[in-house]
Amino acid sequence: MGNPLPQDTLEAIIAASLATSEAAERLTELCDGIGGRPAGSEAGRRAEEWALETLRRQGLAAWTEPLPLLHWDRGPLDLRVDGPLGWPLDSVAHAYSPLAVDLSAELVDVGHGRAVDFAAAGEAVRGRIALCDEEVPAGERNPHRSERLAAAVTRGAAGLLILSSAAGGITRTGVCHRGLAPIPSLSVSREDGLRLRRLLARGGRPRLRLSMQNRAEPSEGRNVLADLPGRDPEAGLVLAGAHLDSWDLAQGAADNGLGSVIVLEIARVLGQLHASLAEERRPGATLRFALWTAEEIGLLGSTAYQRREAEAGGLARHRAVLNFDMTGNPEGYWLPGQAGAGATLAGLARQLAPLGMGPAVDHRAGLHSDHQAFMLAGVPVVALLAPLGPDGGRYYHSRGDTLDKIDLPALCRAVAVGAATLWALADETEPSLPWLSSEAVASMVDAAGLREALTALG
Ligand SMILES: [Zn+2]
């Protein structure tokens, strides 16, 4: 089997991604210069401007697509165990918790917080604050926090407290509801949560007092898009996207400064290559770059784009959508619902072996990132199997998601692999990754046990 990329193209991509990388500058501008950037906040607007300017400076035709949204902003929070021996709990609110809360309630332990755990606790949940783990036993599907909140609301809970999986006072935010939630939902540190659990197990009846004030206002986020036009207007496009928004607690370095910088760097690397080649050596399909808004609050930006394209008849032009979210060290491809890797990506993985890519391909579907709307519509989705390293999951959505945790060589390799992948897919005469029929999408969702999660998300 031949190589999908000519040797000089591959070398140009690797040199621009590694030797003359601008990834460190871009990530520092985003993480230290702008910082946490929830969609609809002032920092969110600054980040969108920065992405637009970066793409234009690199010579690409870039534009924005606005999206109205409700921006939620955290205010003062106090959660404590009541009584003379009471103590303040280390906690943060999940986004879209109610705006004003003043509550005193007993606790109930609902184990892992799965539907079966809430069912087993039954009426004991009513009027109490439900305490549950963030994780489930190995091998089981972990319900999203929105599913845990939905179960707590159904059972009449006064609030939900999710016990952090990471030791050392790490608490995590995240979204748990579309729009303002009916009850408060918080993350509590592992140490405080385990103490509460031990007190309950010994027959204690700790009563919690919770007060918090938050704000919410109508605002706007913007998707930032840019194109490198293909040789053949009939050949459609291949899109590389990542969400630019992050949580407010830290700098959003891993989630998702990594993906944002990968997409901007791919645009720079392939923009240079595009400009250096004669017309006939450029890919047939257009290369499109997308920095999505409002992923963290419900995949809003990518979903709005997908719907608009579907309504305008443009979705069928998408040969493939690449998504970069918390992308670490590239090792293989994630191709949900596809039967194999296809000749192009299998050959490319061999060509990219010196960068660490291997033949591993994962076909199992997953949710909760910007590929979701495209995957459910049948568009071929591509991501990298790219772990973040041993501490990767530890700082997820916490105050610890900062620039100092980032592995720069892995980031540069991900840029090279992502750029090579985008270029090779856009250069195919016939697309090697087929669209999925609605039946194939349904069986992919069922095979991964995701039907319940999709229902909970509406
Ligand atoms: Zn993310």
Image: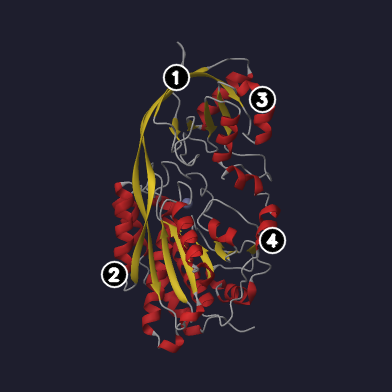
Residue 4, quarter of the rendered image: bottom right
Q: What residue is drawn where x is 48% and y is 42%?
A: 178
Which disc is residue 57 wearing?
2
Q: Horizontal and vertical percent for residue 81?
A: 47, 19
Label 2 crowd (10 A; few <14 / some 14-19 / many >=20):
few
Name which residue type carries label 4: Glu
Element type at marker 4? helix
Precedes in sequence: disc 3 or disc 1: 1
Mark 1 vs mark 2: in front = 2
Label 3 crowd (10 A; few <14 / some 14-19 / many >=20):
few
Element type at marker 2? helix
- Identify the residue under disc 3: 122
Q: State whether residue 437 appears in this view.
A: yes
- Identify the residue under disc 4: 439
Q: Which of 48 and 216 lies nearest the eye of the viewer?
A: 216
Precedes in sequence: disc 4 or disc 1: 1
Name which residue type carries label 3: Gly
Q: Tags 3 and 1 in contact by the CB under 8 Å rule? A: no
Mark 4 vs mark 1: in front = 4
Q: Horizontal and vertical percent for residue 423?
A: 49, 76
**Measured along the vertical axis of the image, is residue 24 above or below residue 165?**
below
Q: Tags 4 and 2 in contact by the CB under 8 Å rule? A: no
